[in-house]
Amino acid sequence: MKLRDKLTFFFSLATALLLLAFGLSVYFFSAQYRKTEFYNRLLKRVDITEKMFLEKDSFTPEAYELIRGQFLNTLPDETEEVVPLSEGWQQKLSVSYPDDFLRSLQENEEAYFFEDDRQGAGRLFHLAGGDYAVMITAVDRVGISMLANLRTILVLAIVISIVIMTVMSHYLSGRILQPISEQIKKANTISDKNLHERLRVFNPDDEMGQLAIAFNRLLDRIDLAFNAQKLFVANASHEIRNPLTAIIGETDVALEKNREVTEYKEALARIQTEAERLNRLVNNLLQLSAISSNLSEIKRDTLAMNSMAEEAVAAYRHINPECRVTLSLSNHNPRVSGNKNLLQTALVNLLDNASKFSGNAEVTFSVEKMLDEVELTITDQGVGIPAEDIPKITQPFFRSENVRKIRGTGIGIPLTVRIIELHHGKFEVKSKLNEGTVVKVVLPCI
């Protein structure tokens, strides 16, 4: 069911229930008022009948009948009778009354009853000669007719109102939902060929405007992801093509003609270097994709960061004996909860970048305890990063123009940032061209 049909149905249903409740209330209170009003009229007839009975001896039979005819029997189908309360008086009644009415009359000296369309009232009065019961019954034909007419009017009014409300709600819901339909048509035209297009925001303060803004933000993220994917593919192709081209070139040269053993060894060494570069690239890619987004899936231990820093420096010196890293440790030896291998990989990557992009100039590595956090700071004096490129360095394979000639994979920083995020840490970079870079890693302590 379409939203327009749902709105029409619910509006019509709500209107029907509201009108039905209103109609039933009007009818119920009208019926109660009619019944009460007619009871009051019956009581007045009881009073008149009682007075006529008391004054009966003051009139001649002819005058009594004349007055009785003028004042009594004025209600539709009215009956009245006055009977003395003697033994078995209920059997002497000329009109049939409900038993509970007679019992209530005798116990409370005043009673009422309602049976089908007939209503009745009665009262006891006491004289020196004995006790008497006055009972009046009648049918409120006018009131019943008016209620029937009211019922007909209410039914017609409810039915007509529901029909009108259904038509109006269908029309109004269509008008209200028209902007959504237009936005849907526009959204259906957006594809990977025109991701730059956006939905029009008519009023940013209403729900439709907020929906369009939310959708446009989603398109912004998708557009960013598409561009990042294109950049990833372009850079990955470039980085993978370089070692493959070098390997193929060296192989072609080596196989072109017979050469000396030393020449073959030199070619194989160059091939090995490029193959190792390609192997590191593939391993980094596999490691980046293998890291889970849920830290609970990673084995965690309590790690002393002073020891972690010393091991990372030692591991990097084994990889690059020519590096010059100065290590400054914290006096408090802060501890964190994390995975030792992943954190060591991140630190070695940062040390490698600092030394590589500074030509193995001096690099300082400090560990400092700050309240409930530990700060790991690596400072180099290298080529630096352009300010506009700093937000892009976390993208796989991205490399600034000023370091294109320096060998690298473009995977180290994205992998490092991912590891730090998994440890609920923060990664900060400050850099100036030709002056150096400061990388700060902040991890929560335990």
Image (tube, rainbow, N blue to C red):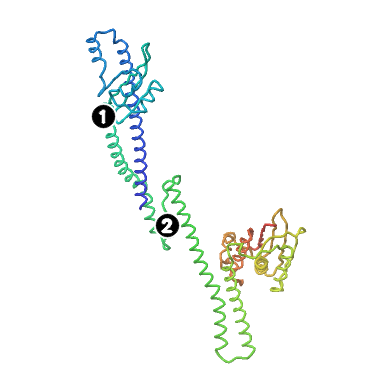
Q: Which residue is at the far front?
A: 87
Q: Residue 401, relative to residue 7: is it above or below?
A: below
When asked about the image quadrant of residue 47, the answer is: top left
Circle 2 sits in a helix, a strand or a loop, which is it? loop
Q: Residue 254, relative to residue 54: is it above or below?
A: below
Amino acid tagged 2 = Glu
Q: Position of residue 397 (x, y in %)?
A: 56, 68
Q: Quadrant of the C terminus?
A: bottom right
Q: Position of residue 375 (x, y in %)?
A: 69, 58
Circle 1 sits in a helix, a strand or a loop, which is it? helix
Q: Position of residue 363 (x, y in %)?
A: 71, 65
Q: Residue at x 55, y 82 (%)?
A: 249
Q: Which mark is residue 145?
A: 1
Between marks 2 and 1, how big is the CA–CA gap?
69 Å
Q: Residue at x 43, y 51 (%)?
A: 212
Which is more toward the observer, 377 or 8?
Answer: 8
Q: Residue at x 36, y 40 (%)?
A: 17
Q: Which residue is mark 2?
A: 197
